[in-house]
Amino acid sequence: MYPVWEDPAAAEENVAFARNADAAMKRRAAGRVYPNFIGDEGPARIAEAFGPEKFRRLRRLKGVGDPDNVFRHNHKIPPL
């Protein structure tokens, strides 16, 4: 969820609304991570999306196919 508003004075109210909406949705979520919806949440969140075994395998493959990490923008899987 990416809230957007025009009036800078409304920032505090809108940020609070977005955080409350996020908390309400998390209570009903399956508790899983979906790789297509990961933003800049860091490498731990990306690893969580794939699980440790798959993430290691993806990193090994990335090291073979893209050792210089040229294609680093999509799911941010670093090469081993």
Image (cartoon, rainbow, N blue to C red):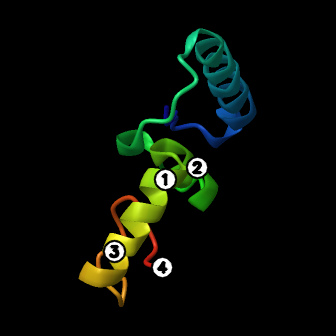
Name the N-terminal-most of marks 3 and 2. 2
Q: Amino acid at mark 2?
A: Arg
Which residue does the numbered mark 1 point to in the structure image? Answer: 53
Q: From this view, report whether residue 67 is shown above or below residue 9.
A: below
Mark 1–mark 4 distance (CA, rounded to whole Å): 13 Å
User: In screen coordinates, is 40 left or right of 65?
Assistant: right
* Residues at marks 4 and 3 touching, judged by CB atoms closer than 8 Å: yes
Q: CA distance from mark 3 to mark 2?
A: 18 Å
> Tag 3: residue type?
Lys
Per the image, label 1 sits on a secondary structure element best described as: helix
Return the x and y of residue 75 as percentages of the image width and height: 39, 58
Q: Is residue 73 above or below residue 16?
A: below
Q: Which of the two discs, 3 and 2, sits closer to the camera?
A: 3
Q: Position of residue 36 (x, y in %)?
A: 35, 43
Q: Amino acid at mark 1?
A: Glu
Q: Are marks 3 and 2 in contact (CB under 8 Å)?
A: no
Identify residue for label 4.
80
Q: Quadrant of residue 70?
A: bottom left
Is residue 72 something that shows in the picture? no
Where 3 falls versus 63 (above or below)? above
Q: Which circle's residue, 4 or 3, is located before the other in the chain?
A: 3
Q: Secondary structure at mark 2?
A: helix
Helix or strand or loop: what does disc 3 sit on?
helix
Write down the residue under mark 3. 62
Question: For mark 2, what is the residue?
Answer: 45
What is the C-alpha distance between the residues marked 4 and 2?
17 Å
25, above or below 43, in the image: above
Residue 50, percent across and down?
A: 45, 46
